[in-house]
Image (tube, rainbow, N blue to C red):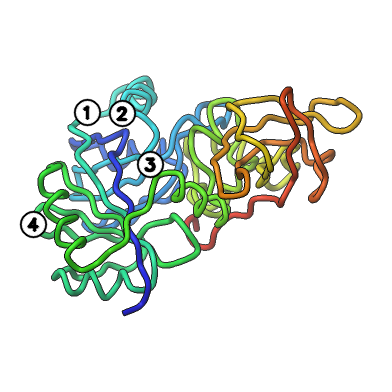
Amino acid sequence: MKSFFGYEYEPAAHLLVTDEDAADFLQSQFSNELRPFDVGRCTYGVWLDVKGKVIADSVIFCEGAERFRILSEYSASAVIAQKLKQHIIADDVEIEAQSTGAALALIGEGAFAVLQQLGFSVPEAGSFVNKLGVMLSCGRRSTALSFELWSDSAATIAELKARLVEIGMEWISAERMQLIRIAAGIPSVPCEIGPNDLPGEGALVGDAVSLTKGCYLGQEVVSRMHHVGRPQRGLFRISGSDRAPNCPIALYNRESKKIGELRSAFSTENGWQGVALLKTRYAVVGELLNHETGSVKIEGLFQSIKGGAE
C-alpha cells in the first residue's frame, strides 16, 4: 500500500449561515468564488476587512440554496461571525455558531485507497461528500494528496480514527504537520498572515483570493495591488540552529535595520523552521537575520499553491 499518515485536530470555527439571502450575502463577503451555489461544492478562501486586510480564513460548504456551513481550523467562530454580522444591512441571513466537532486529515498517496476501503466516495477538488455524519473533502496541507474528514460528533471521529488505527495508519504531531505545511508554502491564518496584513503579502492571491469574481469586501484593494503595484512585504521560510524563539519577534539585517517579524517557529531535530513576514527589498535568500536572542537564515519565499481561485 502507498504511504499515508493522519493528523487529528479540533476546528476553531463552525458556523451555519442560512435563509434566503445567504448565498448572495456570502458571495459579497468571501474572497473566493462561491458560484454556482451547487450542493456539494466547497471553497477555501479568506475574509477581508474594508482595507483588504486578512481577518480570518475558512472553507465554505454549500448544503443547499439557503444553507452554508463554515469551518476553519485556526480562525475562531466569534471572529468570523462578528465580521459577517457587522455587514448585514437588509439581508435575510441567519448566522449561528455551532459545536466545532472534531476532524482528521489524511495525507499521502495511500489515503485515496484507504478512504475507498472505508466505504467513502472520494470527492474531486472543490467538492465534498457526506457519509453517515462525516463530511469528506480534499485538503490543502501539503504538496501530496490530502483529505479532510469532519463531523460535529467527536465520538464519530473517534470511531473513524479507531478503524484507521486498525489499518495501520501513522499519526503525526501538530508540530510535524506545521513543518509539512511550511515546506509546501501554505500560510497559516491568522498566525502568519492576519489582521495587519494583505493577502498579496501572504501568497494567497491565486489560491484563496479571486481576481475575477467581481465585487466582494476588500476586492478593490486586492485588485489594485495586483494590477498596479506589488506587495512590499512577503512571507519567507526561515530556519535556525538554536532553540526556537517565542513568536512574534522582530528581525533585523546586518545593518541593524528592522526588516520584518518572525511569525511562527517549530522545532526540528537540528533546530527549528518557521515563517517570517519580511520587507522584500531587504530580504535575500541565504542571508542571516538577527533577533534579540540569536539569528535566523532566510530559506526561501512562499509561493501560492496550485489550484484555488479562478
Give me the disc on residue 60: none
Which tag, 2 or 3, sits closer to the chain's start?
Answer: 3
Distance, label 2 to label 1, CA atoms, is 6 Å
Residue 156 left/right relative to 55: left
Question: Residue 121, how many percent across, how many down?
Answer: 19, 70
Q: Is residue 164 above or below residue 227?
A: below
The residue lying at 75 percent from left, 37 percent from top is 232
The secondary structure type at the circle numbered 3 is: strand
Which tag, 1 or 3, sits closer to the chain's start?
Answer: 3
User: Mark 4 = which residue?
Assistant: 132
Distance, label 4 to label 1, CA atoms, is 22 Å
- Specify few, some or many for label 4: CA neighbours under 10 Å numbering under 14, 14-19, or 20 or more: few
Could you tell me if the residues under marks 2 and 1 are in contact, i.e. CB atoms within 8 Å?
yes
Which tag, 4 or 3, sits closer to the chain's start?
Answer: 3
Q: Find residue 243 and report its image quarter.
A: top right
Residue type at numbered disc 2: Ser
Residue type at numbered disc 1: Ala
Q: Which residue is farthest right?
A: 255
Residue type at numbered disc 4: Leu
Give me the disc on residue 77: 2
User: Mark 3 = which residue?
Assistant: 58
Residue type at numbered disc 3: Ser
Could you tell me if the residues under marks 4 and 3 are in contact, i.e. CB atoms within 8 Å?
no
Residue 273 left/right relative to 92: right
Distance, label 4 to label 3, CA atoms, is 23 Å
The residue lying at 52 percent from left, 50 percent from top is 179
Question: Residue 302, how many percent across, how many down?
Answer: 64, 50
Depth order, front residue of 85/119: 119
Q: Is residue 138 above or below residue 282?
A: below
